[in-house]
Image (cartoon, rainbow, N blue to C red):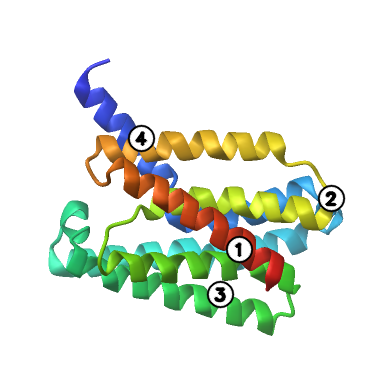
Amino acid sequence: MREKHIILAARVISALFTPFYLPLVSLLALFLFSYLSLLPLVYKLYVLAIVYLFTVLMPTLLIYLYRRFHGWSLIELGNRERRMVPYVISILNYIACLYVMDSNHIPHFMGSIVIAALFIQIVCAMINAWWKISTHTAATGGMVGALFAFGEIFGFNPVWWISLGIGIAGIVGTSRMILRQHSLSQVVMGFIVGFFLSALAILFT
């Protein structure tokens, strides 16, 4: 495979597994593989729509507009000083998501997924103030941590899905290194931070 094809594949993987999808994918897994699958389809779609709006669509759109306003490329936006505003944008949207979920009386354990993602965003923002960490692998680590935590809470065996999540984390981390966005230590640390923050937030909030 030519180098340009490898780079293209890495870019596609990075785009597909953006950190914003952590709450949505975790909730989707919960609705499919736990007793929550018994909930009415309309209700599940309603919850997923709220989470998608505030954790994927709005942050992506606002960060894109912010980047276009300044005329920066994605690589230029990755500069340490410029990364903080996207973090603030996503954190505020996650807080808004929690407020809307609470206002609509959506069960707390569903909101705990967004809380876990919010904790990951905040901690990664703090770490990135002095050392670059991969939010892509933090998100995949968070997804694996969420599967582990909900396996404990609802008593189902998530081992195959955890294995799949770890495999995806490896692919995503490799893609970030191919694109020279992160080193090995940064992607590994991202996964570790995401896993533990997600598992602790869901189990104890």
Q: Quadrant of residue 57?
A: bottom left
- Label located before the other in sequence (2 or 3): 3
In this picture, residue 165 sits left or right of residue 134: right
- Label located before the other in sequence (4 or 1): 1
In front of the other: label 4 or label 1?
Answer: 4
- The residue where tag 4 is placed is 174
- Label located before the other in sequence (3 or 4): 3
Under mark 3, the amino acid is Cys
Task: Estimate the spatial distance between the alpha carbons at disc 1 and disc 2, rounded to whole Å.
Answer: 27 Å
- The residue where tag 2 is placed is 155
Q: Quadrant of residue 58?
A: bottom left
Above or below residue 2? Residue 205 is below
Task: Estimate the spatial distance between the alpha carbons at disc 3 and disc 4, rounded to whole Å.
Answer: 31 Å
Under mark 1, the amino acid is Ala
Task: Estimate the spatial distance between the alpha carbons at disc 4 and disc 2, rounded to whole Å.
Answer: 32 Å
Task: Estimate the spatial distance between the alpha carbons at disc 1 and disc 3, rounded to whole Å.
Answer: 11 Å
Under mark 2, the amino acid is Gly
- Label located before the other in sequence (1 or 3): 1
Under mark 4, the amino acid is Thr
Q: How many marks?
A: 4
- Label located before the other in sequence (1 or 2): 1
Most extreme residue toward the left is: 71
In this picture, residue 159 sits left or right of residue 119: right
Q: Which quadrant: the N terminus?
A: top left
Report the front residue among 45 and 187.
187
Residue 47 percent location from the top left of the image: 67, 65
- The residue where tag 1 is placed is 49
- The residue where tag 3 is placed is 97
